[in-house]
């Protein structure tokens, strides 16, 4: 892979990972347009590093906000932890259950099946993008014009956290169903104020990202029979460069997301997802990607 390809993918990943438009859909389509193989080991390593870069962007951007929102008092911290645990547990139950179903039922006839084998199915990505677009559009229009009030962390109730966790579970196996878009939109529809929905969504992302990275790394090792191989070794340096670009792009994306969410423009991300879904469907059914 060329350094130019790495930089392009890093910018796409960094922006789309944190904007509610699905990074996986954008990265997979970009890889195909660049003539890259999304399943190649060196590409998998690059994506692991790009996810790491965006995770650190989230931590840097939200750290002070989290301290004010969730660590201001013992009560706020306890409420936050309970909501985080409930939401993450339900994400695991729903998401891992769906992954097990895909790998052991839908892909049972394929040896060494991983649900990631569906990542290059542009028809599935288009459908997931469309579903995310409808959810974001509904939440954005429902909350359009309401202010970005700053409230206590207790406003994320156990019931609201449960709905957010369940919906986040569907984001794990279905590439194109934006995690940030789905969780923030679910929070808004459940009555969580805009700023708090954003804070809680990205706190969940920091919890979810390390296990996702670990799974990708484990899959990479298993598919290469415990050996990283020369192709992966040669991809280490450009992957580090990609992580740095993803970090910077991620910070810009978060500033964009916050402004549009607080200004009542959230629904436009839904419109974009619907347009992107139509474009991906065109690539699949008319151009044969």
Image (cartoon, rainbow, N blue to C red):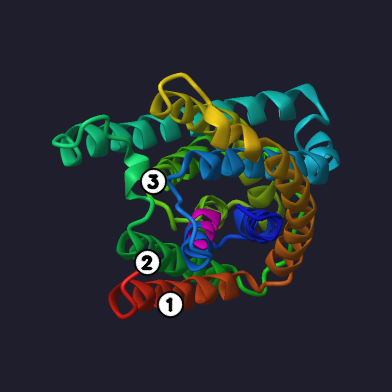
Q: CA distance from mark 3 to mark 1?
A: 22 Å
For residue 170, which numbered disc appears in the image? 3
Residue 208 visible at all: no
Mark 1 residue element: helix
235 relative position to 149: left or right: left
Mark 2 or mark 3, which has the lower sequence index? Answer: 2
Name the residue at the front extreme.
Answer: 230
Label 3 CA crowd tier, 10 Å (few <14, some 14–19, many 20+):
many
Query: How many numbered discs sit on the rendered protein?
Result: 3
Write down the region rendered in magenta: 22-27
Name the residue at the left extreme.
Answer: 109
Magenta run includes residue 26: yes
Image quarter of residue 130: bottom left
177 relative position to 52: left or right: left
Q: Which residue is mark 2?
A: 126
The residue located at (58%, 60%) in the rendering is 20
The quarter of the picture where the C terminus appears is bottom left
Would you say the residues marked 2 and 3 are in contact, meaning their CB atoms lie under 8 Å apart? no
Image quarter of residue 120: bottom left
Q: Which residue is mark 1?
A: 279
Mark 2 or mark 1, which has the lower sequence index? Answer: 2
């Amino acid at each position: 892979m060329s350094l130019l390809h790495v930089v392009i993918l890093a910018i796409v990943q960094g922006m789309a990972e944190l904007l509610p438009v699905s990074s996986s859909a954008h990265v997979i389509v970009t890889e195909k347009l660049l003539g890259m193989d999304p399943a190649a080991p060196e590409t998998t390593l690059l994506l692991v590093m790009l996810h790491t870069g965006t995770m650190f962007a989230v931590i840097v951007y939200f750290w002070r906000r989290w301290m004010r929102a969730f660590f201001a008092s013992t009560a706020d911290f306890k409420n936050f932890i309970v909501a985080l645990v409930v939401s993450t547990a339900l994400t695991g139950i729903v998401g891992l259950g769906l992954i097990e179903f895909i790998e052991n039922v839908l892909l049972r006839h394929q040896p060494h099946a991983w649900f990631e084998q569906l990542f290059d199915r542009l028809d599935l990505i288009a459908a997931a993008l469309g579903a995310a677009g409808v959810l974001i559009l509904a939440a954005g229009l429902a909350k359009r014009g309401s202010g970005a009030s700053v409230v206590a962390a207790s406003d994320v109730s156990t019931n609201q956290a449960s709905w957010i966790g369940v919906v986040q579970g569907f984001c794990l196996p279905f590439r194109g169903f934006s995690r940030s878009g789905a969780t923030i939109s679910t929070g808004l529809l459940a009555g969580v104020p805009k700023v708090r929905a954003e804070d809680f969504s990205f706190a969940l992302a920091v919890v979810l990202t390390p296990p996702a990275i670990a799974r990708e790394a484990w899959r990479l090792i298993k598919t290469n029979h415990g050996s990283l191989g020369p192709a992966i070794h040669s991809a280490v340096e450009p992957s580090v460069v990609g992580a740095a670009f993803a970090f910077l792009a991620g910070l810009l994306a978060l500033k964009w997301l916050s402004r549009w969410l607080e200004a009542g423009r959230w629904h436009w991300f839904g419109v974009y997802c619907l347009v992107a879904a139509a474009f991906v469907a065109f690539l699949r059914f008319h151009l044969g990607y």
